[in-house]
Image (cartoon, grey):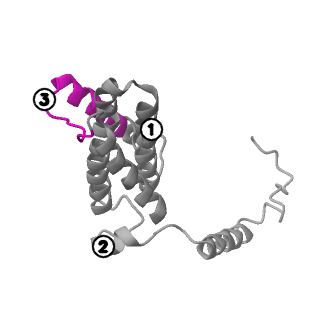
Amino acid sequence: NKFGNLSGLGLIIFTWLAGSPSGEPISLAGREPIFYWGTILPIVFGLLCSVIISTLANLKKPERVTVSVECVYQNTGIAMTSCLAIFPKEDIPDAIAVPFWYTGMQTVFVGVYCLLAWQMGWTKAPASENIFKVLLNSYEITTEASEEDEESCDRIGANASDSTTSAGVIDTDEPQRI
């Protein structure tokens, strides 16, 4: 995971430096406003729509955060690499600026969203935990915890009403509604 993050960061730096035929870094200054807003709006709408839809689907709060991040956070490395390979040298700075700007903005928006979700208690990491500990640790359920949950479900099932058999088949003379 850390190697992947370093590789992604390396690609962004490489793209920024290789974005111009003259070897100058990509410039995002002086572009039309639609360039900036047209790139940011899908991120904002994606976050809003994914939170609303996942809430309407009654997903748990950590699952809502996951769905939202997965909907918005795109692999822009593919877009950057494609721009370098597909466009003629003179068009590369304009073409590559879009995924480059999107990468920066998705990092900012998703980062702020994740921090807010964490502080509102929407993640598995405790809101009172130190931010560095949260960033460096995983709060995913381990295999041992999954097995404990499974055993606890088995115990609950075993203590359920006597009208079911161990196979979960209803064992009663009364007609059942399905």
Query: What residue is disc 3 on?
Result: 30
Rounded to the nearest angstrom, the CA distance separating label 3 from label 1 is: 24 Å
Q: Is residue 4 above or below residue 104?
A: below
**Front in this rendered view, residue 60 or 41:** 41
Side of 63 where 155 appears, left or right: right
Q: Secondary structure at mark 2?
A: helix
Rounded to the nearest angstrom, the CA distance separating label 3 from label 2 is: 37 Å
Residue 18 found in image quarter: top left
Rounded to the nearest angstrom, the CA distance separating label 1 from label 2 is: 32 Å
**Front in this rendered view, residue 33 or 170:** 33
Which residue is at 39% across, 61% downward?
123
Side of 135 where 81 appears, left or right: right
Q: Position of residue 140 (x, y in %)?
A: 50, 67
**Front in this rendered view, residue 75 or 15:** 15
| Residue 92: assigned label | none
Q: Are marks 1 and 2 in contact (CB under 8 Å)?
A: no
Q: Main secondary structure of the magenta part?
A: helix
Residue 33 shown in magenta: yes
Residue 62 found in image quarter: bottom left
Residue 87 shown in magenta: no
Which residue is at 38% across, 38% downward?
52
Q: Note whether residue 31 is visible.
A: yes
Q: Secondary structure at mark 3?
A: loop
Q: Are marks 3 and 1 in contact (CB under 8 Å)?
A: no
Q: Which residues are magenta?
A: 23-47
Query: What residue is disc 1 on?
Result: 81
Q: Secondary structure at mark 1?
A: helix
Query: What residue is disc 2 on?
Result: 132
